[in-house]
Image: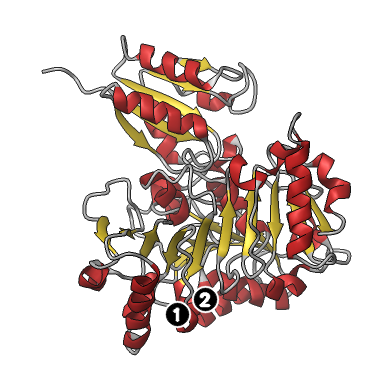
């Protein structure tokens, strides 16, 4: 029987320290590994190269040639790895091309989720709770060449650096002109110049009127954040308030108290090397999602681990506060990306601020990353991808058929007492979209095996499967 050929599309995240144990283990099993983003021998991530049987550098190689080299590798190999950056299917056209070529050649493709720039930015800007109208992502060159701004939504604009490329001057002028027409001149604009924000200096705060003065410094790694008009006051302070190295003003005490907010992703195997290293240095580590049993390798690697399963947010915050009487550095482990729709970490962060405890948030694989990979959302609607916190706005839900929409925390519509909101959601969806329009119901927390976790239905059929929507469910409604 002919042996199955497998391509593993993986990533180390934003830096080599963000690689997950799952990805490291998968690469070690490959007959050959290729990478379009790793430095040469002796560069960053050398430990990744050394862990692979055969490692090939493809930095600077065109997308079609990368795909061709990978396809040729299967002449002598059964399992090949392709290592890229960020989350493999989040605004990474090389990964999409590679997948298409391999699939056409009859090669099975598996995609491993990784830390993305989205995760890092969400943590940096504390977007745990975004605008009630949603968080809109614009992620293609075409969409930023002719943008349609929606001031009611928080907006993240990826790839704005392409407007600074030769020949794109007219598109840049159009972008800035439309921005000024949509927002007041004094409206805050944040330019995030590095996807990984471990140190100060990578965040530029300006205004709609002042953006043109700093736009020449926007490069291909930059992202622009526009808060919703209703949220603008929240971001009007100095830029340093969001930077990890300057998390609070004033001279720090000799022994600064630090809380490490970390996560193992969607399952323990997705913990990053950075997170493991940080937790090992903590005096005590707590978690509301790990049980600390004999098979819990994360708990076993930490000093003074205590499981807080079943404890409510206020009780967790009190435990952490008490731990600082004996320790300078305390860790808290959650699931998903720590600051993405996580009410517990939101409460903890507020409590630590009141105690003048510095909070350091480490990026992790989120349900967003896994969903993007599962549904191949590398290229989403030109009008953007809208993220909605269903629980926060169920009493005033708006629908946007012109863009792709992910409804997170959809399971709250099935909670006791929310039947009227569930009925209103289904009625509003039916009014905004044709009955035959496709709907995907994604049941996280871990969806590398899509069987049973992905339900494909329609607007008309959603009501019949809505009973399967729970607290870990996200619903995708594609744009028309």
Q: How far apart are marks 1 and 2 (CA)?
A: 27 Å
Q: Where is residue 245 in the image (x, y as percent from the top left)?
A: 77, 54
Q: In this view, does 109 lie to the left or right of 258?
A: left
Task: Measuring from the top left, give residue 40's x and y in whole percent.
Answer: 62, 17
**Number of numbered discs:** 2
Q: Is mark 1 on a helix, strand or loop?
A: helix
Please tell me the numbered disc located at residue 394.
1
User: What number is the disc on residue 23?
Assistant: none
Residue position marked by numbered label 2 in the rendering: 316
How many neighbours does mark 1 have within 10 angstroms: few (below 14), some (14-19), or many (20 or more)? many
Q: Quadrant of residue 452?
A: bottom left
Can you give x and y, in whole percent of width and height, for residue 229 in the image?
Answer: 71, 72
| Circle 1/circle 2 CB separation < 8 Å | no
Q: Which of marks 1 and 2 is nearer the N terminus?
A: 2
| Color theme of the render | secondary structure
For residue 25, above or below residue 425 = above
The image quadrant that residue 140 belongs to is: top right
Question: Which-is-in-front pick, marks 1 and 2?
Answer: 1
In this picture, residue 428 sits left or right of residue 90: left
The answer to which image quadrant residue 436 occupies is bottom left
Q: Say left or right for 49 vs 478.
A: right
Q: Can you say which quadrant of the picture contains the N terminus?
A: top left
Observer-nearest of 384 and 60: 384
Instruction: Classify the position of the C terminus by image quarter.
Output: bottom left
Q: In this view of the protein, can residue 304 be seen by the observer?
A: no
**Residue at horizontal 37%, vertical 47%?**
375
User: Closer to the camera, 20 or 165?
Assistant: 165
Residue drawn where x is 49% and y is 35% of the image? 11
Residue 479's spot in the image, x, y percent? 43, 56
Residue 387 versus residue 171: which sits nearer the camera? 171
User: Tag 2's secondary structure?
Assistant: helix
């Amino acid at each position: 029987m002919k042996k199955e050929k497998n391509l593993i599309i993986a990533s180390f995240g934003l830096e080599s320290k963000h690689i997950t144990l799952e990805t490291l283990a998968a690469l070690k099993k490959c007959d050959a590994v290729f990478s379009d983003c790793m430095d040469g021998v002796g560069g960053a991530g050398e430990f990744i190269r050394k862990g692979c049987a055969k490692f090939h550098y493809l930095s600077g190689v065109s997308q079609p040639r990368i795909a061709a080299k990978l396809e040729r590798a299967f002449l002598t190999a059964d399992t090949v790895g392709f290592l890229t950056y960020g989350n493999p299917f989040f605004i990474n056209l090389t990964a999409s091309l590679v997948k298409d070529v391999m699939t056409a050649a009859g090669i099975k493709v598996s995609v491993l989720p990784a830390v993305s720039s989205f995760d890092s930015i969400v943590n940096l800007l504390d977007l745990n709770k975004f605008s009630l109208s949603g968080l809109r992502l614009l992620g293609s060159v075409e969409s930023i060449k002719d943008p349609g701004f929606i001031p009611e939504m928080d907006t993240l604009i990826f790839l704005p650096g392409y407007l600074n490329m030769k020949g794109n001057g007219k598109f840049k002028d159009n972008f800035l002109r439309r921005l000024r027409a949509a927002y007041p001149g004094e409206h805050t604009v944040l330019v995030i110049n590095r996807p990984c924000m471990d140190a100060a200096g990578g965040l530029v705060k300006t205004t709609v009127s002042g953006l043109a003065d700093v736009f020449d410094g926007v490069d291909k790694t930059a992202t622009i954040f526009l808060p919703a008009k209703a949220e603008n006051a929240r971001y009007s302070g100095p830029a340093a308030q969001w930077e990890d190295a300057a998390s609070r003003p004033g001279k720090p005490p000799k022994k600064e108290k630090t809380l490490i907010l970390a996560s193992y992703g969607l399952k323990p195997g997705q913990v990053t090397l950075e997170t493991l290293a940080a937790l090992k240095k903590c005096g005590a580590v707590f978690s509301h999602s790990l049980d600390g049993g004999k098979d819990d390798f994360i708990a076993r690697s930490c000093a003074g681990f205590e499981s807080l399963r079943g404890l409510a947010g206020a009780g967790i915050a009190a435990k952490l506060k008490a731990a600082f009487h004996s320790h300078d550095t305390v860790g808290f482990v959650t699931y998903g990306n720590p600051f993405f729709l996580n009410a517990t970490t939101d409460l903890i962060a507020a409590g630590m601020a009141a105690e003048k405890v510095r909070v350091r948030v480490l990026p992790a694989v989120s349900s967003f990353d896994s969903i993007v990979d599962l549904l191949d959302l590398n290229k989403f609607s030109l009008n953007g991808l809208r993220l909605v916190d269903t629980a926060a706005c169920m009493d005033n839900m708006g629908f946007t058929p012109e863009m792709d929409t992910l409804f997170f925390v959809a399971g709250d519509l099935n909670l006791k007492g929310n039947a009227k909101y569930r009925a209103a959601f289904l009625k509003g969806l039916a009014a905004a979209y044709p009955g035959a329009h496709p709907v995907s119901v994604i049941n996280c927390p871990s969806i590398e095996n899509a069987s049973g976790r992905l339900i494909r239905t329609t607007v008309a059929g959603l009501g019949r499967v809505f009973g399967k929507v729970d607290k870990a469910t996200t619903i995708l409604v594609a744009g028309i």
